[in-house]
Image (tube, helix red, strand yellow):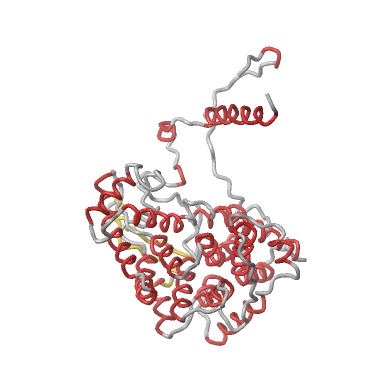
């Protein structure tokens, strides 16, 4: 037997052994009242911390029972609808204003906002030779992997990398917020060059542009974009910037920060969390699901055809056989996700401008039918509605943003929330986060090696 064949046999043997010794009887979670995913059976999360940064509100308690209500999202106590209406009514971009609010707790006046935008612009330049040494020489097939690695690499260029004083945390946070778009776009361009044989085009950011404008400027070979395109991308960044302390990646920020480690390690860990398809990668799955749907549905106006396809998804007969209708349902929201409602309005405007109206109508039909079908097919303790991923994928597709950048753009926005939560964790000097796990392994005696049988 050659060495490679032997390796494959061993890996196969070990995988079966690992799976067998890792499997836990599901009934034991009920027996020991374990809150899997730190959530109880009603869907309510286990209270693990306090925050003043973001609030997700989706139900009220009436006579001891949880009653779902239309979802609300608040940044520093201000409703996201009011924030969006505020800057859009004045024809301004909102991401920088939102970042200021989340980091510093107050809405900036015009002078403060201008100073903050200028500081972000000053910090956008990456360290000398960083693009060549940290990105081009180490290309990755996954931009999120490269983002995480690049953030860790920035540690080496920071003389105060381990300093966790508040002034240094602010400096590091602003620098990361400013540089994350470059890391994401450059990572994608290097990916397409090395793995898809495309020309490598690297643009420098424009100091007069904000975050959304610079992303489109950096990404497109001709650097051109419309005002509506930049406006909708800016809105998407605002809606993804924060979502409370309990979402997976932000909770990871709190967990890693509580150990006392450096900013780059903490943000890198959050990026690794966001990469997962159960978290930040969901909008890619939405677009892929609709591409498959369009291939199998002849009449996009037929609710009957659409319903049958959605049933096939739930029965694991269609798309990726996961049984999931991506973009529908949320761990907290049940009646509505306020981010999806806002983004849908702008997605429709963008679809009309770009000639995607027919596809947008298909999304609307699925938004209407999927919750009904899920409710009929499965026993749900709460209702379901479309979440922000449902329309963000469509928006990115209309903007001609490649799928490889969908989740990285989520990270470009959410790094604001992560940094704010990291500062909050350190300011309050909490204990290291260390939840309990109960061992259910039977006690056994150690067996000398000569007395062990072969597995």
Residue 53 visible in the displayed image: no
> How many tags in the picture?
0
Q: Locate residue 166 relative to residue 229 in the image: left or right.
A: right
The quadrant where residue 352 appears: bottom left
The x and y percentages for residue 146 are 63, 58
148 lies above or below 308: below
> Residue 12 versus residue 400: which sits nearer the camera?
400
The x and y percentages for residue 236 are 46, 69
> Residue 104 versus residue 187: which sits nearer the camera?
187
Residue at (68%, 74%) from the top-left corner? 125
The quadrant where residue 378 appears: top left
Q: Residue furthest right?
A: 159
Q: Locate residue 30 relative to residue 192 in the image: left or right.
A: left
407 lies above or below 100: above
Q: Residue furthest top?
A: 451
Residue at (53%, 34%) from the top-left corner? 438
114 lies above or below 415: below
The x and y percentages for residue 170 are 64, 70
Q: Which residue lies furthest to the bottom in this view?
A: 111
Quarter that holds the C terminus: top right
Residue at (33%, 45%) from the top-left corner? 314
Residue 192 visible in the displayed image: yes
Residue at (42%, 68%) from the top-left corner? 395
> Residue 57 versus residue 279: which sits nearer the camera?
279
> Residue 322 versus residue 306: which sits nearer the camera?
306
Quarter that holds the N terminus: top right
């Amino acid at each position: 037997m050659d060495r490679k064949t032997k390796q494959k046999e061993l890996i196969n043997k070990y995988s079966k052994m690992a799976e067998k010794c890792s499997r836990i009887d599901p009934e034991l979670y009920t027996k020991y009242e374990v809150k899997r995913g730190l959530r109880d059976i009603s869907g309510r999360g286990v209270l693990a911390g306090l925050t003043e940064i973001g609030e997700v509100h989706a139900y009220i308690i009436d006579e001891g029972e949880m009653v779902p209500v239309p979802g609300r999202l608040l940044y520093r106590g201000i409703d996201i609808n009011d924030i969006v209406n505020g800057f859009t009514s004045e024809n301004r971009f909102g991401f920088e204003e939102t970042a200021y609010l989340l980091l510093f707790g107050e809405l900036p006046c015009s002078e403060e906002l201008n100073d903050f935008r200028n500081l972000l612009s000053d910090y956008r330049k990456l360290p000398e030779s960083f693009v060549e040494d940290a990105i081009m020489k180490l290309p990755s097939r996954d931009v999120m992997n490269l983002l995480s690695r690049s953030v860790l690499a920035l540690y080496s260029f920071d003389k105060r990398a381990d300093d966790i004083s508040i002034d240094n945390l602010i400096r590091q946070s602003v620098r990361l917020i400013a540089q994350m778009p470059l890391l994401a776009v450059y990572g994608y361009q290097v990916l397409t060059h090395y793995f898809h044989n495309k020309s490598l085009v690297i643009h420098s950011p424009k100091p007069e542009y904000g975050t959304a404008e610079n992303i489109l400027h950096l990404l497109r070979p001709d650097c051109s974009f419309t005002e509506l395109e930049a406006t909708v991308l800016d809105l998407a960044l605002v809606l993804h910037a924060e979502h409370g302390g309990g979402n997976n990646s932000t909770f990871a920020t709190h967990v890693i920060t509580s150990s006392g480690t450096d900013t780059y390690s903490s943000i890198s860990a959050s990026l690794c969390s966001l990469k997962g398809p159960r978290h930040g990668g969901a909008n890619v799955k939405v677009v892929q699901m609709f591409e498959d749907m369009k291939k199998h549905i002849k009449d996009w106006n037929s609710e009957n055809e659409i319903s049958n396809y959605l049933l096939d998804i739930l029965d694991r007969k269609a798309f990726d056989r996961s049984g999931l209708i991506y973009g529908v349902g949320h761990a907290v929201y049940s009646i509505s996700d306020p981010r999806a409602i806002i983004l849908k309005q702008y997605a429709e405007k963008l679809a009309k401008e770009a000639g995607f109206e027919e596809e947008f109508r298909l999304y609307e039909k699925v938004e209407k039918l999927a919750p009904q079908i899920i409710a009929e097919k499965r026993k749900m303790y709460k209702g379901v509605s479309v979440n922000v991923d449902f329309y963000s994928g469509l928006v990115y597709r209309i903007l001609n943003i490649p799928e490889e950048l969908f989740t990285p753009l989520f990270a470009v926005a959410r790094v604001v929330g992560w940094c704010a939560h990291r500062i909050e964790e350190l300011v309050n000097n909490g204990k290291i986060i260390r939840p309990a796990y109960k061992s259910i392994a039977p006690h056994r005696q150690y067996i000398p090696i000569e007395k062990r049988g072969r597995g």
